[in-house]
Amino acid sequence: MATKTFKLNTGANIPALGLGTWQGESTQVKDAVVAALKSGYRLIDTAYCYGNEEHVGAGLKEAFDQGIVKREDVFVVTKLWATYTSRAEEGLEKSLRNLGLEYVDLFLVHWPLLMNPEGNDDRFPKLPNGERDILRDYSHVQIWKNMEKLVGSGRTKAIGVSNYSKRYLEELLPHAKIVPAVNQIENHPQLPQQEIVDFCKEKGIHIMAYSPFGSTGSPVTSAEPVIKIAEKHGVKPTTVLLSYHLYRGSTVLPKSTNPERIEANAKLIELDAEDQKLLNDYSEGLVKEGKVQRYVYPPFGVDFGFPDKS
Ligand SMILES: NC(=O)c1ccc[n+]([C@@H]2O[C@H](COP(=O)([O-])OP(=O)(O)OC[C@H]3O[C@@H](n4cnc5c(N)ncnc54)[C@H](OP(=O)(O)O)[C@@H]3O)[C@@H](O)[C@H]2O)c1
C-alpha cells in the first residue's frame, strides 16, 4: 500500500502515504527518513517551522547516495512559515537551501496568516505584552497570490495550502489563478472535517491528512470503534487509523522516528463497508454532540473559519 498514489490537479501523482517529521530532531529524523524510504515510503513531509529541514535533507542525501531512491522518485513537501507569507520566494529559497534540494514537489502555505517579518523572532515573534506579533490586516488571498508567483520557477512542482477551512477556500478561490493542489489538514475519526473534505473534492483539491493518531501520545488510537475494527482484522489501532484515509481518498502522514513503527505504519489494509460505517457513524456522533477533538491548534488568536473553533 505504500506505493499507492492519487492524482493531483497538476497531473502529478502523489503517494497515499508519507512520513511526518514534526517534532523529529537531528539525527533521529535523518535516520527516520532513510528508514522510511527503505520501507517503501515515497513522500516526506517537513516544514521550515519544524527546524529540521536540514536533517530531512541529510536523510534524503544519504538515501540518494546509498541508491535507495532517486530524487525524482521521492515526493518532498515543505511549507511556507507564517513570518514568510509576504516573502514566499525567500521562504522557498531558504527551505531549499536547508533541504539541499533543487526543487520540492509541493510547497504549502503552512497557516493562512502573516506574522511580523520584522519582529523579534524569525519564527515566533512576540509583542512586548507576550502576545504573538501578527499583522492582522494582511489578507490570506494576498498570501496565495505570492505563492502563485512561484509556479514556473522550477523550484516547486506544485503549490497548495494547509489549515484552510471551507470558509477560507471559498474566499480564496474566486481570486485564484491556480487552484491549490492540496489542502493539508488535521484529519482522523475524531475530527472528520467532512465539510472541508467534500468541498476540496468538489474543487479538485487533494486532502493530506495530518496527525492521523491525534499527534503526541496518539490519543485517537484508544477510540472504541478503532479498537473494535483493529481486533476484527487482527491489526493495531494505528493501522486502522491510517487505512481510514485510503477509502476517503486522502494522503496520510504518520510521524514516527522509531524504525519498527515506521515500517509497521507502511502496511495499510482495506477497511470494509461495515468498518467504514462504524467509523463514519462515530465521527457523525461526535460532530452532533459538539465533541470533535482538534489536537493541533497553535494559539494565534485568529479565527480561521473552522466550525469547531469559530
Ligand atoms: N500542516 C500542519 O500544520 C501540520 C500539523 C501537524 C502535523 N503535520 C504533519 O503531519 C505529521 C503527523 O502528525 P503528528 O506528528 O502531529 O502526529 P501523529 O502522526 O498523529 O502521531 C505521532 C505520534 O504517534 C507515535 N506513533 C507513530 N507510529 C506509531 C505506532 N505505529 N504505534 C504507536 N505510536 C506511534 C509517534 O511516536 P514515535 O515517533 O515515538 O513513534 C508520535 O508520538 C507531522 O509529523 C507533520 O509532518 C502538519
Image (cartoon, rainbow, N blue to C red):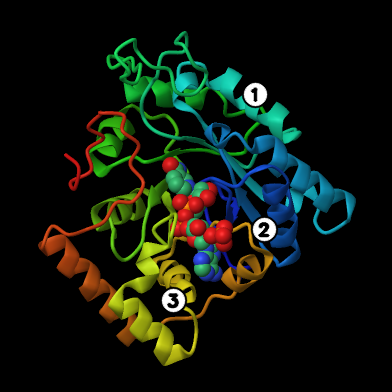
Considering the numbered disc 1 on the image, is that residue within a helix, a strand or a loop?
helix
Q: CA distance from mark 2 to mark 1?
A: 23 Å
Q: Quadrant of residue 127?
A: top left
Confirm whether residue 26 shows in the render. yes
Q: Earlier in the sequence, mark 3 or mark 2?
A: 2
Left or right: residue 216 versus residue 29 is left
Viewer-proximal residue among 14 and 35: 35
Within-10-Å neighbours for mark 2: few <14, some 14–19, many 20+: many
**Residue 76, how many percent across, how many down?**
64, 45
Name the mark on residue 42.
2
Within-10-Å neighbours for mark 1: few <14, some 14–19, many 20+: some
Dot 1 corresponds to which residue? 94
Dot 3 corresponds to which residue? 237
Q: Quadrant of residue 178?
A: top left
Considering the numbered disc 3 on the image, is that residue within a helix, a strand or a loop?
helix
**Residue 145, how many percent across, how many down?**
43, 22
Label 3 or label 1, whichever lies nearer to me, is 3
